[in-house]
Image (cartoon, grey):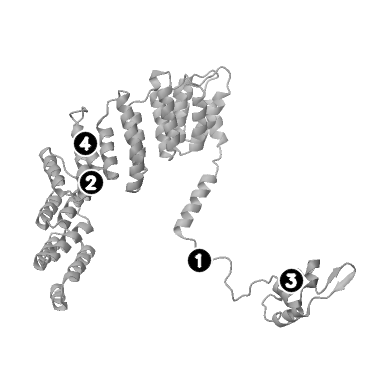
């Protein structure tokens, strides 16, 4: 509109706006949009007192084509697509297959028992049909669910990761105090930990402890599920340190309740202490095995400790444990073997590091690239360039390193050479 009608008066637009239109209308690729994109504050009665320049300053103008658009023309990143698919999957609701549901109902007798319902749910592969079958049975006259029907339904939903639906079934179970057993509650705790609902799992654990039904009391399996869940939450030493205090309290409560720790729970405590940088506490638990507790250390016990000691540069203690481990016929894992070789090399004991590296190869343990680099770099730092060169060629001749790894290690040696003539001679 080129004019504004207000209170029976025709108010002409300011001359500066007319000039602006006449100057830019022809330049705009969308003249009609440009014309109507000017929304004058002249509509406001208080704006009549403003000068023309002030009025122009308060107008809103569509952006010029020379400015960037509001939407990106780049393809969405992989992380964005992953998050978007995850949200879409979480928001999507499964659709019930009515035909399968009706067929499952038809396979039950008119007065079915808990065992018959349990078998029917077990044979059904669709978790949503299992849930609807469970809910349908709840509404049948003279039928009451028992621990077996709750258990099979919760397992079906947990395996399908339908955690919200599983939570609803668990709430129904908790409302009936006399139903339940240890295996049922252990499954609930396990699937809640899989769903990263650790607080919910701990609440189920407390419910087991407070239950009057002795069949529902926690066992060593219950404690091991919780210890494993707390270990898996750690991503760095600080997080592991925070969860380690909870693990320590849980372990103490287990012992106070008269539950005898097994090798799994003791190794979990050793691993937790190592990951939280409390290696001395891990050694204390290790030395109590077989003395205080009726469990002897296994390969995992030694493995965690050797890795933790090497991470703190305590190579002498790590070597002692490694020799004791060999006497008992245990073999270190790839991770701990690499840690031992790296720690010895960085500590200046290059000869020992090379010996352990060859032993590692004889034990069919894979040597990673960092270990190869560390050993060669420390040999070069001691001025033994020829020895490093011969060692690398020996690795290549025995097919211990592929072509790509060989070239990367070659660059390590070249970086440690002093002059370019030596580098060229090494290449040929």
Question: Residue reaching furthest right?
Answer: 8
Alpha carbon distance from label 2 to label 1 = 46 Å
* Viewer-side label of 4, 3: 4
Q: Earlier in the sequence, mark 2 or mark 3?
A: 3
Residue at (68%, 75%) from the top-left corner?
A: 30
Residue 9: quadrant of the picture: bottom right
CA distance for labels 4 and 1: 56 Å
Q: Earlier in the sequence, mark 2 or mark 1?
A: 1
The residue at which mark 4 appears reads as 284
Which numbered marker is on residue 22?
none
User: Pointers 4 and 1 in contact (CB under 8 A)?
Assistant: no
Which of the two residues, 388 or 101, is positioned nearer the viewer here? 388
3D distance between C-alphas at marks 4 and 3: 80 Å
Res. 220 in view? no
Is there CB contact under 8 Å for labels 2 and 4? no
Question: Label 2 neighbourhood size at 10 Å, few (<14), some (14-19), many (20+)?
Answer: many
Mark number, residue 74: 1
Q: Which of pointers 2 and 3 indicates the residue nearer the eye? A: 2
* Separation of residues labelled 2 and 3 (CA atoms): 71 Å
Instruction: Name the image quarter holding residue 60.
Output: bottom right
Q: Which residue is mark 3?
A: 36
The foreground one among 360 and 270 is: 270
Secondary element at tag 1:
loop
Quadrant into which the C terminus falls = bottom left
Q: Is residue 136 visible?
A: yes
Q: Residue at x 15, y 45 (%)?
A: 317
How many discs appear? 4
């Amino acid at each position: 509109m080129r004019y504004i009608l207000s209170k029976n008066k025709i108010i002409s637009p300011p001359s500066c706006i007319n000039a602006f239109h006449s100057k830019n209308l022809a330049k705009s690729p969308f003249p009609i949009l440009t014309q109507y994109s000017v929304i004058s504050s002249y509509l406001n009665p208080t704006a009549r007192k403003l000068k023309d320049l002030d009025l122009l300053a308060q107008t809103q103008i569509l952006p010029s084509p020379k400015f960037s658009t509001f939407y990106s023309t780049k393809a969405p990143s992989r992380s964005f697509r992953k998050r978007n698919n995850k949200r879409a999957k979480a928001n999507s609701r499964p659709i019930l297959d009515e035909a399968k549901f009706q067929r499952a109902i038809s396979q039950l007798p008119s007065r079915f028992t808990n065992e018959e319902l349990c078998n029917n749910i077990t044979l059904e592969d669709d978790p949503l049909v299992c849930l609807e079958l469970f809910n349908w049975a709840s509404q049948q006259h003279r039928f009451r669910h028992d621990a077996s029907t709750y258990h099979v339904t919760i397992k079906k939903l947990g395996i399908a990761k339908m955690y919200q639906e599983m939570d609803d079934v668990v709430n129904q179970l908790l409302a009936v105090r006399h139903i339940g057993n240890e295996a049922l509650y252990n499954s609930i705790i396990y699937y809640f930990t899989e769903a990263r609902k650790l607080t919910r799992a701990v609440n189920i654990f407390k419910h087991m402890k407070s239950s009057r039904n002795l069949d529902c009391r926690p066992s060593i399996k219950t404690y091991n599920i919780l210890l494993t869940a707390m270990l898996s939450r750690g991503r760095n030493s600080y997080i592991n340190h925070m969860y380690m205090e909870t693990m320590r309290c849980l372990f103490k409560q287990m012992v106070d309740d008269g539950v005898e720790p097994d090798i799994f729970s003791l190794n979990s405590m050793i691993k937790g202490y190592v990951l939280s940088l409390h290696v001395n506490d891990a050694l204390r638990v290790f030395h109590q095995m077989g003395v205080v507790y009726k469990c002897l250390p296994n390969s995992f016990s030694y493995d965690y400790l050797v890795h933790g000691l090497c991470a703190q540069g305590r190579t002498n203690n790590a070597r002692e444990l490694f020799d004791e481990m060999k006497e008992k016929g245990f073999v270190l894992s790839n991770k701990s073997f690499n840690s031992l070789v790296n720690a010895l090399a960085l500590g200046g004991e290059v000869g020992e590091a090379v010996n352990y590296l060859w032993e590692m190869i004889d034990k069919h343990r894979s040597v990673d690239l960092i270990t190869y680099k560390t050993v060669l770099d420390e040999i070069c730092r001691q001025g033994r360039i020829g020895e490093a060169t011969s060692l690398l060629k020996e690795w290549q001749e025995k097919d211990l390193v592929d072509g790509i790894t060989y070239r990367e290690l070659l660059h390590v040696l070249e970086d440690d050479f002093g002059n370019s003539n030596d580098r060229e001679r090494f290449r040929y």
